[in-house]
Amino acid sequence: MSKQAEFAVILKMNAMFADLGTDELQRLSNLCHTQHLGNGEVLFQKGDAGDALFGVRRGQVRIETGASDGSRLTLNFMGPGDLFGEVAVLDGQNRTADATAGEASELFVLRREDFLAFLEREPKVAIKIIALLCQRIRWQSERMEESMLQPLPVRLARRLCALAADFGSEVHISQEQLGVFVGAARESVNRQLQAWRKEAILDLQRGRILLRNMTKLTAIARNE
């Protein structure tokens, strides 16, 4: 399979492009090129121009920001098959976080100028993008409601289940980073994780969490 065909598959898995036909996806994927990053190499920094959409072909990219104490906080992980930078490639505004390779990675790159020219020729895609942005607003509202109404165990279990869906039962993330995800202090996160460790739901190791009982964790995430 060619790289362009691989990118077409990744685009098809994303809500923004899911309804496009094979020919449309192929024309769009033909606009991409690839970029290689070494482990720890910075792809972009907060404040950089949003001039491209990225898809991960292999490797991992961390979306990060700085904490008040000077440390780094990971906001999200992007693995093979993930797209990111959709909003920036649309509005051209500055990046709101940093992107750093967590390991040697290869990315598909679709430049903003090429993408906008494609949208002018393909209004169906523009309609899909409007729907996607509305979907994101709904998602943001749900996360806000969740942070205010759902207890910490439910929020934490949902985040761990989401990470497991992307990266398997061994999740490389710090407790401080988990706290940022779920809107809780590291100490509160630690207490809950320790309780789950005693119940054999998970195991804690330095910088990573081993998920042992996904059935139980999923039930907690569903607030059952």
Image (tube, rainbow, N blue to C red):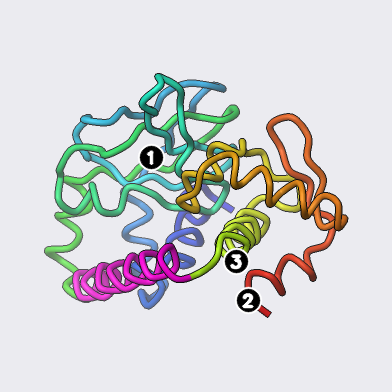
Q: In whole angstroms, how far apart are the C-alphas of marks 1 and 2? A: 41 Å
Residue corresponding to mark 2: 222
Secondary structure at badge 3 equals helix
Q: Is residue 174 found left or right of 134 in the rendered image?
A: right
Q: Residue placed at 21% from the left, 72% from the top?
A: 130
Q: Which comes sooner in the sequence, label 2 or label 3?
A: 3
Q: What is the three-letter code of the residue carrying label 3?
A: Val
What's the magenta bit mostly, secondary-structure-wise?
A: helix
The residue positioned 19% from the left and 69% from the top of the image is 126
Residue 105 quadrant: top right
- Residue under numbered circle 3: 154
94 left or right, relative to 157? left
What is the residue that sits farthest to the left in this orientation? 120
Instruction: Bin the neighbour count of mark 2 within 10 Å (Cα to Cα): few under 14, some 14-19, many 20 and up.
Output: few
Kind of residue indicated by mark 1: His
Amino acid found under the numbered disc labelled 2? Arg
Closer to us: mark 1 or mark 2? 2
Identity of the residue drawn at 76% across and 46% down: 194
Q: Position of residue 61 (x, y in %)?
A: 50, 37
Mark 1 is surrounded, within 10 Å at the Cα level, by few (under 14), some (14 to 19) or many (20 or more) other residues, namely some
Tell me which corner region of the image, top left, top right, bottom left or bottom right, holds residue 148.
bottom left
- Within the magenta stretch, is there residue 147? yes
